[in-house]
Amino acid sequence: MRMRRPRRIFAQVLTAQVVITTGVMVLATGLFLAPLGTALDDQAMRRAQSIAQTTAADPDLARELVATGPDPRGPVQADAERIRTATGALYIVVMDTRGVRWSHPNPAEIGRHVSTDPSRPLAGREVRQIDTGTLGRSARAKVPLRDGRGRIVGAVSVGIAYDSVRGRLLGSIPGLLRYAGAALAVGVLATLAVSRSLRRRTHGVAFADISALLEEREAMLHGIREGVVACDRYGRIRLVNDEAARLLGLDAAAAAGRTPGEVLAPGRTAEVLSGRVSGADLLAVSGGRVLVANRVPTRDGGAVVTLRDRTELELLGRELDSTQGLLDALRAQDHEHANQLHTLRGLLELGRYERAVAFVAEVSGAHRASAEEIAERVHDPLLSALLVGKAAIAAERGVPLRVSAATLLPDAVVDPRDLVTVLGNLLDNALDAVAAHRSAAPAGPFAEPGAEPGTGPGAGPLGRPPAEPFVEVELRAEGSTAVLRVADTGPGVPPALRERIFAEGWSTKAAGPASAHRGRGIGLALVRRLAERYGGTARVTARAGGGAVFTVVLPEALARADSPHGPGAAATADARLTAAGEPR
């Protein structure tokens, strides 16, 4: 049977760590033994050198060497054997200048020439080496032997049995192995603990599955149509998927490792991603887009933020509000038309035909004049239709919508939808403010907290709302710049709140059933973001006599005369429609 490699991560890591730990311990033991053997050799040679130097320092030995001959019973042999026995050396050989032995542990060798070259010690140099002689391998040292006048008369060679050196080395191995075994056991136990922790963290996933899981994760994150931004415990961005990069206008590679505050403009979006704003389904505006953000903390201290694009839903919601207002206005006009028809029928039954004709002309002329006036001043069909619709809604709510005499906007609008978004939001807020202020509600949409009813800016005498509430709109062109201005007679905006009202998610209005499909605090934030995208401004000031004036400047929102979208192009299009027999 062939042994199979373990597939689980913890098992593979355990096996690898045990093998590595064992290999490291064997290598460390080998690396320790090698210098230990060298150190023992050097120690033995130094010991032999010390014995040789001590022996050669005896002045009687030099006199005896000169005065006598090589004799196994001579004084040189006796002194050498006495020192060898006392020091435990393998041998002590005393030789003359010819290399002839005068002492040796084997008396038969006395008088014979030494087996190794004696030239170096006889030349006055000391020698240390591991060599093989007549008594086998030994750690030896040779020193010159001098007489009382300093003349070299011979040499002393001392050997330490090499088997004793090897024995000391081998004797140290068991202790060393015990230490190595203990270290190996500790390493294996630590490895086992790490592997068990790894098994808990990886849930028993196999190595072969990691690549597939990573590929699935990447495909899922970059394939879903919801933005995902992951941050670590220090607030730095770790991951930005494709949809989040598109919604936030980020470069995913450049954003990695940086905080949301460093890669995003100051505002609610950066605060939500950083965790400074908490809650579920938080609304934010980024680059003209309305986003719904949810931030979920992770176990490692970081967080994952999901972003959903709610721009289309927000626009549809506002269109639904406008449609609902139009329906209410049409319902009211239906009642009004019914009354007018009853009046017309009565005039006809009474035979007052001339008066009936005049009554019909008067009623139809008033509505036609209002719509024609708007169309003459605002040439773009989307914007003029918006104003006509808002005028009907304002009439239903009892708030006249006036078009300023200074209003004049050509039809060369680069993107009418942006202007519709800006103007629609401003008109909705103005109508809400005037209607709430007129109905003497406890506080208007922009009233300061704790203010008494009817005491805000723009209140009439004795704290009552002004006698003639209205909303006035002005659209004009300054070259290629569009200027939108909406004034109302509502409670106005206190100076302390004039910047805060443009922040995402901030509103003094209570979300009711009519606005259940969308959140509050988005309209004015969208207005400012669109203005900033055009390089313009959005601000609010006080109206003389009470109320508020919102002014939005959009540079390059209008096409120049020589551009493909300029007035000449519109005139050419009108000529083509007329030639085709279609009304403009």
Image (tube, helix red, strand yellow):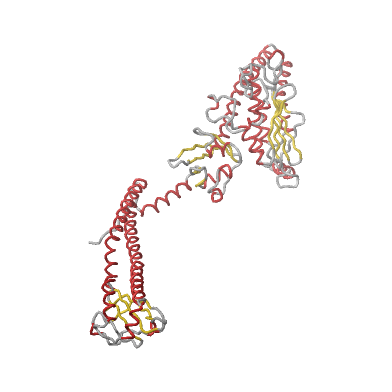
Image coords of residue 162 (percent x, y): 29, 73
Quarter the C terminus occupies: top right
Name the residue rendered at 53%, 30% in the picture: 517
Image coords of residue 497 (percent x, y): 65, 28
Nearer the observer, 338 or 111 = 111
Q: In this rendering, is residue 241 above or below 56?
A: above
Q: State left or right for residue 312 relative to residue 468.
A: left
Q: Residue furthest top?
A: 350
Name the residue rendered at 75%, 47% in the picture: 562
Quarter the N terminus occupies: bottom left
Q: Quadrant of residue 567?
A: top right
Q: State left or right for residue 81 relative to residue 387.
A: left
In this view of the protein, can residue 348 be seen by the observer? Answer: yes
Q: State left or right for residue 571 relative to residue 210.
A: right
Q: Quadrant of residue 311?
A: top right
Q: State left or right for residue 59 relative to residue 72.
A: right
Nearer the observer, 28 or 442 = 28
In this view of the protein, can residue 311 be seen by the observer? Answer: no
Q: In this rendering, is residue 462 above or below 56?
A: above
Q: How many marks?
A: 0
Image coords of residue 29 (percent x, y): 33, 63
Nearer the observer, 349 or 584 = 584
Image coords of residue 142 (percent x, y): 36, 79
Q: Quadrant of residue 477?
A: top right
